Image: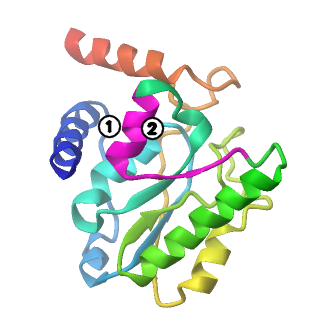
Amino acid sequence: MIVLRWVFWLMLKVYLGARYRVRVHGREQLGRLDGATLVMPNHPGYIDPFLIFMTFWPRLKMRPLVYGGNFKGLMGRFIVRLFNALEIPDLDVASARAREQTETAVGGVADGLGRGESFSLWPSGHVQRAGIERIGSARSAADILRKAPGAHVLLVRTRGVWGSSWSYAQTGKKPNLVGRILTGLGWIVAN
């Protein structure tokens, strides 16, 4: 699976590199990160997790925490396995099972950080709806860092994604992700 991750990373580098200009400020500080790192980016659109993966995965090999509802079906399951992601259930629907799954994932991240692994966690837990990051009652990051106090924290601010077709900005609704991928590929081929 590691070979597939490198192939996917290379595809993202080519595909997203044709569309987005990514600049990293403070890249020299990445060299100081050794061992367990919790990457905590803002979440302006559905494309930014791929931008984060493209930018930081070669150095950190982080595993993302993802909302399982976005990764249904055969392709979704493949992406979860490809990224070696930990799934978080929908917490808007309160249930004992969802809480237990979330606590298991949070414990898995804390244990992984204790073993020196790296993870990416979007503190807000959802994509921006109005161009403003709202953390709300999400507390997973605090729980994880309480259990793994020696972990490095890498804060990432993504700019320039809000307003794109990958965000809520254009329609106020969740974009069709498969449609966005196909449209993007079409524009690259057309250009």
Residue depth check, mark 2 versus mark 1: number of the one nearer the observer = 2
**Disc ID at residue 47:** 2
Location of residue 147 in the rendering, given as x and y in whole percent from the top left corner: 59, 84
**Disc ID at residue 20:** 1
Residue 140 sits above or below residue 130 on the image: below
Q: Is residue 128 magenta?
A: no
Which residue is found at the position 61% from the left and 36% from the top?
69
Location of residue 15 in the rendering, given as x and y in whole percent from the top left corner: 24, 31
Q: Is residue 80 magenta?
A: yes
Task: Choose between 21 and 117: the one closer to the eye.
Answer: 117
Location of residue 93 in the rendering, given as x and y in whole percent from the top left corner: 82, 43
CA distance separating discs 2 and 1: 10 Å
Residue 136 sits above or below residue 177 on the image: below
How many numbered circles are shown?
2
Q: Secondary structure at mark 1?
A: loop
Badge 2 amino acid: Ile
Which residue is found at the position 58% from the left and 81% from the top?
145
Residue 172 sits above or below residue 160 on the image: above
Left or right: residue 31 versus residue 87 is left
Q: Which of the marked residues, 2 or 1, is nearer the chain's N terminus?
A: 1
Q: Secondary structure at mark 2?
A: loop
Location of residue 13 in the rendering, given as x and y in whole percent from the top left corner: 21, 41
Left or right: residue 116 versus residue 123 is left
Give the quadrant of residue 12.
top left
Task: Choose between 54 and 6: the one closer to the eye.
Answer: 6
Are circles 2 and 1 on residues that touch, CB within 8 Å? yes
Left or right: residue 37 versus residue 147 is left
Residues drawn in magenta: 75-90
Task: Choose between 110 and 156: the one closer to the eye.
Answer: 110
Which residue is found at the position 23% from the left and 79% from the top?
31
Left or right: residue 82 versus residue 113 is left
Badge 1 amino acid: Tyr
